[in-house]
Image (spheres, rainbow, N blue to C red):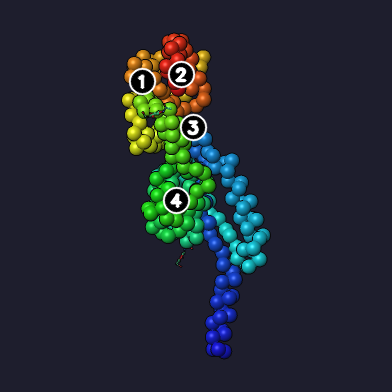
Amino acid sequence: MLECLPVLLFLIQYTSAEIFKIGYLTGSQRQLGDLEYSKPGRTISGAISLAVEEVNKGQLGRMGHKLDYIVAETYGKEVVSVQKTADLWKMNVSVYIGPQETCEHEAFMAAAFNLPMISYYCIHHATSDKSKFPTFARTRPPDTQISKSVASILLAFNWTHVILLYLKSADYEVFETVAEIILEVLKAAGITVAATRNWFVPFHVGYDDNPFYSILEETYKDTRIFVILGHHYEHFGLMLAMEEMNLFDTGKFLV
Ligand SMILES: *[C@@H]1O[C@H](CO)[C@@H](O)[C@H](O)[C@H]1NC(C)=O
Ligand SMILES: *[C@@H]1O[C@H](CO)[C@@H](O)[C@H](O)[C@H]1NC(C)=O
């Protein structure tokens, strides 16, 4: 028994000073030449210093441990985000907080490294598959949630034949991502998407040519149900175009 004591003491001493390193993946800056990236990390990141401070003041701190964090900037680019995930692993982090816009490949790496990854932002649905991404969790619902609601509404009214319109722009990639998921979910639900059509820059009523006239000309004979994915003012633009084309007169069209 006495022989064990020094070892035990050593262990207690050793563990009592443990510092847990968090790898914080955030997009809070623009790369040189990027004039568009909205840098959500700038508004979110205050939370990490606050949280770490509170945890260090709380139970963990009282037990003699400490949290520390290393910031890794992704510039909102997937390739940088993946690279930083590897860099942080090399720095021996115990957990990832983040990443932001993308997470599929980062979460797969976290699984391979057997490190927990908690994203506060990424909505990509693939990471919900826990057999493939067992160490990934998030605090924001994935984009499939909305897709399932769309499918449920359509099915409830027996609207099984629709046209999908969405904004396709590199600056608003989220719409394209969600559109792809909606397509998958609708197909699985037995709903036919007769066609998809796009507009390519955000449309503000009264400032640009309304892109929906030509889209409607091409599609209104194929369906009466339109699903649109974009900004609310673009929805308004579609409604205006349909109104002017008298499509609502018969009560047969629905957006
Ligand atoms: C990470 O851990 C390894 C193994 O304990 C050690 O050799 C290396 O120096 C550590 N790297 C950093 C950046 O702390
Ligand atoms: C949808 O179709 C099914 C089968 O044709 C029918 O039983 C049901 O009443 C329909 N629902 C609505 C809301 O029209």
Q: Secondary structure at mark 2?
A: helix
Image quadrant containing the N terminus: bottom right
The percent coordinates of residue 250 (x first, y second) are 43, 12
Mark 4 burial class by Cα count in 10 Å: few <14, some 14-19, many 20+ = many
The percent coordinates of residue 3 (x first, y second) are 54, 89
Task: Name the residue rendered at 52%, 25% in the picture.
Answer: 232
Dot 2 or dot 1: first in sequence order is 1
Dot 3 or dot 4: first in sequence order is 3
Q: Amino acid at mark 4?
A: Lys
Q: Secondary structure at mark 1?
A: loop
Q: Secondary structure at mark 4?
A: helix
Q: Amino acid at mark 2?
A: Leu
Mark 1 burial class by Cα count in 10 Å: few <14, some 14-19, many 20+ = some
Q: Amino acid at mark 1?
A: Thr
- List the residue tagged with mark 4: 84
To which quarter of the image does residue 184 belong? top left
Task: Name the residue rendered at 43%, 40% in the picture.
Answer: 144
Image quadrant containing the C terminus: top left
- List the residue tagged with mark 3: 36
- List the residue tagged with mark 1: 223
Looking at the rendered structure, the number of numbered marks drawn on it comes to 4
Seen in the picture, residue 221 relative to 180 is either above or below; the reply is above
